[in-house]
Amino acid sequence: MAATTRETACLFCSLCCPAGVAVDSVGLAAPEYPGHTAAAHHGLCYRGHFIAELVTHPGRLHEATARADGAVHSLPPADALRRVAGLLPGVRRETAVVLDGNLPCEELAAAVRCAREALGIGAVAIFLPPADEAVLRGVSTSAAPRLDEAALSHCDVVLAVGDPFATHPVVAGAMLDALARVRGNRLLVLDSLRGRTARFASTFCRVRPGGEAAALAGLLCALGGASALADVAGLELPTLAAMAGVPPESLTELAGAVAKAQRLGVVVSLPEGRCRSVAAAAALAAKVAEAAGGGICPLLTYGNAAGARRVAAALKTEPVSRLLAAMRQGSITKLIALGTDVAAALAGTLPESVEVLVAAAPMPSATTARAAFVLPMALWFEMAGTVLDGAGGRHRVEAVAAPPGGALAATGILNALRDTGAGDQAAGDADLGALLDPEPAADLKGVLGTPADWAPPAAEGGKRVLVSRADGFGFADGAVTTQLAWPALLEPSPVLRLAPSDAAAVGGRATVRSDGGAALSVAVEASPDVPAGVGALAPCFPEARALFAWGDDGAGPGLVTWEKCGG
Amino acid sequence: MANTDSPTLDAREIRSRVLLDLDRCIGCKSCSAACFYGHRGMPSVAYGAAAEAVVPVVCRQCEDPPCVAACPFEALRREDDGAVTRSLVFCRGCGSCVLACPFGVMDTDLTRDQVAKCDLCEDRVQAGGEPRCVAACSTGALRFLRPADATGGGLLLLGGRTTGHHPFKRR
């Protein structure tokens, strides 16, 4: 059976690795490895393999559905679009459009313009995982150069904030190359869990869960770079070290290693639920890099997070947090969600009063479950365009397969709404150069806030701290990956990792309750990587996300209690 | 090297093996995902816990494979290129090979009714490529090499198959 191989860039993380899919004559898809050569290993992590399964996944939506009188009816997509188009003219002012940011830049720009100019909807937002947005905002405050994998592999000292080996396995190759290049090169790790990266560390500094920003500020103080933060009060090493839960000597030792670096690379991997003030931590990490004459490598969940942020800034779209505030105030009552499972991603912070008018999605999700109309939508590897990786490098994504059935891209859906009567203007074409340059810079003072904002959650009165862990099977909010075969084989439902003593106390299963009132029954595993009094849970399960502490900047470590199931 | 007309043990000696550099394995399981998706949901990369590390364990393609001898249905055989392959048609999933394998590589739990067996991705290797687990490896920990090339490159072979300068020291 002859197979046709098509290549694209993988958008399951911000490294944008080359990925391929071979589709044989009967339509079965298998992964291919176009970027790999025997001489230069690049590889494709577990997430890159999901593309092949998603091409032919039986759960993909093929037809539209409409909800009426509590029942769901199937209907041709054209009919659904016509009915939505009939509703739109009366509700434009109270309707918001939220676009998934992990789409090519051209697609995002065209969809934003179409929603505004052709449909007359002013409240348009591009959704990024809040932690991605915060990391990009944080590093944009610094002039430190962005490092890609090639540049990272030539650093003599690498400081990893978080656990990049677990979240972005491909970058580990470059970091191990850097470590092995010259005897004496060092890998410094700052993390709250002893994860995969920490196992390879020359120096591992374990901070209190959520204490990364305080530790980095302390490191900056020890480096003598506190003058860069002169506007922020109370920057003293002992205070910051106490806040981060580490001895001041540990930060001084780290600072000594950083100061000796000829070429320092700072790698930041702070997914949802890991750190309370992600933007501040990213900004401080970039300042550490700047103070030592090094560069920064931000690792993000969305492959095109950097491109989406630039498109959003150029087209002045609404921040999702502002739309949520408008929803809580009642000025926005209807939502059109294109490609994003916003209900799962924001873990219940989407007000129940908001009517999801349209949910266009590749697969059933928490958002489609509450939508009046559901439309099948193409995934990013079924369209072509330009994306920006975390270091700002441009990549081209190509369609490796045609979208199934009646699935359309976001612009296809919006154009169809316009053509069926909801609008009467043609949307303008996107000028990519003007959209993507330059990177929008954030104000350092605004990003840092005050040191009080960096304080990790204090476990008092029987409370425990819940942090997120990345374990190699999920992507983002899990809207897609919980329905895939490989992740289901590894961890079909959330597993809470506890210190052996805590795990022995609760047995094999526990009920976790958050301060916010969410509760979940989970399997328990003992892990020596987790300190006592701390629980680690993967955030790529929609049902687990509500257990973390959600704020405007996304999720940080949550305060929870856990007890033996039935106890 | 291989003489397919009258294969001898030497002629059938496997040319290259999948070798693991323990110094570079981060336990991301991308190799297992590649095997899973490349073999229609039947991964044959097992995982072993060595001290604190979790490392992939791939079939060593034994010269005198106990799994072949144990199979009552002749579903397993050693090919001319040295790879030990399993016929999906003849395999009944009895698990004899799983019990016979001295390295614990074969596992029925992963594959429901049939036993997964590494075939060294013969479709890719015959076309001049590498097995999927090697191609997917994010860090270059898995390599497809002749053992002689591995030792010539200064790597230490453990158990004849596994490489690494100080394999367990780091962890």
Image: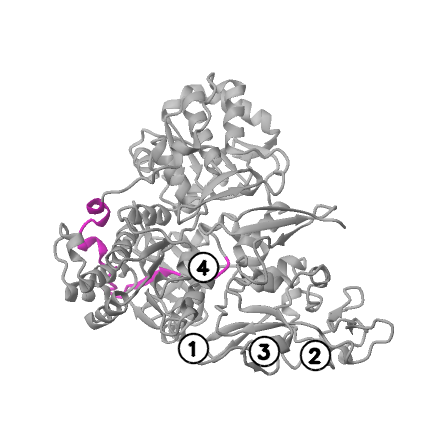
Secondary structure, mark 2, is loop
Determine whether label 3 and label 4 are within 8 Å by CB. Answer: no
Could you say whether the residue bearing mark 1 is in a helix, strand or loop? Answer: loop
Q: Are marks 2 and 1 in contact (CB under 8 Å)?
A: no
Q: Position of residue A365 (x, y in %)?
A: 50, 44
Q: Chain of mark 3?
A: B
A230 magenta-colored: no
Task: Tell me: A140 left or right of A69.
Answer: left
Please report whichever mark, 1 or 3, sits nearer to the chain's N-terminal start.
3
Q: Percent position (x, y) of residue A527?
A: 42, 72
Position in image of residue A117 (x %, y %): 42, 22
Query: How many C-alpha atoms fall within 10 Å of the one at disc 4: few (<14), some, or many (≥20)?
Result: many
* Highlighted magenta segment, given as a residue range: A444-473
Residue that badge 2 annotates? B62
Mark 3: few/some/many CA within 10 Å (<14, 14-19, 20+): few
Marks 4 and 2: same chain? no
Query: Which residue has dot 1 on it?
Result: B170
Asked if residue B55 is positioned above or below residue A418 in the image, the reply reads below
Lower position in the chain sequence, tag 2 or tag 3: 2
Q: Nearer the viewer, mark 4 or mark 2?
A: 4
Does any portion of residue A49 appear in the rendered image?
A: yes
As measured in the structure, the alpha-carbon distance from the residue carrying label 2 to the one carrying label 1 is 29 Å
Q: Are marks 3 and 4 on the same chain?
A: no
Viewer-side label of 1, 3: 3
- Inter-mark Cα distance, 3 to 4: 28 Å
Which residue is pictured at 78% across the width and 66% down the height?
B87
Residue A171: image tag: 4
Indicate which disc residue B152 carries: 3
The amino acid type found where label 4 is placed reads Val
Between A470 and A142, which is closer to the camera in this rendering? A142
